[in-house]
Amino acid sequence: MTTSTILLLILVMVFLLARFFTLKMYALKPNKHDDTPEKLGIGFEEVRFPTENNKILYGWWIPAEKDAKHAPTLILVHGWSRNLGRMLRYIQHLQPLNYNLLAFDARHHGSSDKDDHASMYKFGIDVKAATQYALSRDIDTEKIGVVGLSIGGAGSTYAAAIEPAIKAVVTIGAPAHPVDVMQHEFKKYHIPAFFRWLILKQIEMKIGVKYEHFAPVNNIARAEASFLVIHGENDEVVLPLQGEKLSGAARPGQCDYWLIPDRGHSNCHHEAGFWERVDHFLQTQFNKGIGRS
């Protein structure tokens, strides 16, 4: 066997190994919710609405307790490998504050349609689809916000850049750039640099859109919305530097950054004053130039 043949076989093996890792990263098994808002004594309507590629998203529509037509509307977005059940704690605290709420499963998650693979980009497109659905309801179209967790927050940032109806965004533990988060994971497993590059390229090809196009750090300043970027100081999944990077890319006055000491990736909402601060931020944005409803 010639040297060139051996080299070719090695390259093929490296490519196939990278392909295997790529597929493993996208190997999500949709988990459906176990509970509904009914468990909290909150009424809701099961809804389904379209997104790109003729796929259908599943969600819960929860009207505000008072004057739903004029109340603000919040779209609640779960994170990677989760489902809308993850947002029950948010529903429990936000619904009594008189918001209309729309929680939904992103593609390839929960009860929504599969669509070959999941990605941050698809999260963003699905948030836009959820916004369009909310606009079809009898609501105040000038008071629409999004609350997104992790990848859901990253997708919400991209959605705000392409959907001007979104006026306010709260992200919790959101990445600033997808490559940063994946590189952080790769390093945990001591994956060589060239192999990391090859995997990242394969993932980008699978998504079909350049990372730079939908990376939150490149989109926050493009959005008309205001942002509250929340991050746990002890977050080891999405490092706090990501929150700093995301908030730092915003226009002057567009973004508030809240770094919460002693909190990690999934428990920021346990912080004292969390719900009050989120509510104050949202109400401030929704009532700019308008009288409070």
Image: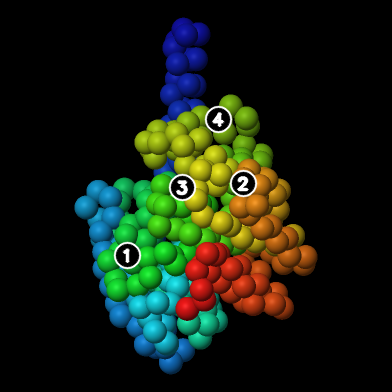
Residue holding disc 3: 161
- Where disc 1 sits, the SS reads helix
Residue holding disc 4: 197
- Report, in whole angstroms, how far the alpha carbon at label 1 lies from the one at label 4: 41 Å
- Binning the other alpha carbons within 10 Å of mark 2 as few (below 14), some (14 to 19) or many (20 upward) gives many
- Report, in whole angstroms, how far the alpha carbon at label 3 lies from the one at label 1: 17 Å
If the image is split into quadrants, where does the N terminus sit?
top left
**Does residue 267 sit above or below 190 in this rendering?**
below
Sequence-first disc among 1 and 4: 1
Q: Looking at the picture, how far across and down is residue 134, in whole percent? A: 34, 67
Sequence-first disc among 2 and 3: 3
- Binning the other alpha carbons within 10 Å of mark 4 as few (below 14), some (14 to 19) or many (20 upward) gives some
Tell me the number on the disc at residue 135.
1
- Where disc 4 sits, the SS reads helix
Of the residues shown, which amino acid type is indicated by label 4? Trp
Badges 4 and 2: C-beta atoms under 8 Å apart?
no
Badges 1 and 4: C-beta atoms under 8 Å apart?
no
Q: Looking at the picture, how far across and down is residue 254, in whole percent? A: 61, 52
Depth check, front residue: 119 or 2 = 119
Of the residues shown, which amino acid type is indicated by label 2? Ala
Depth check, front residue: 198 or 266 = 266
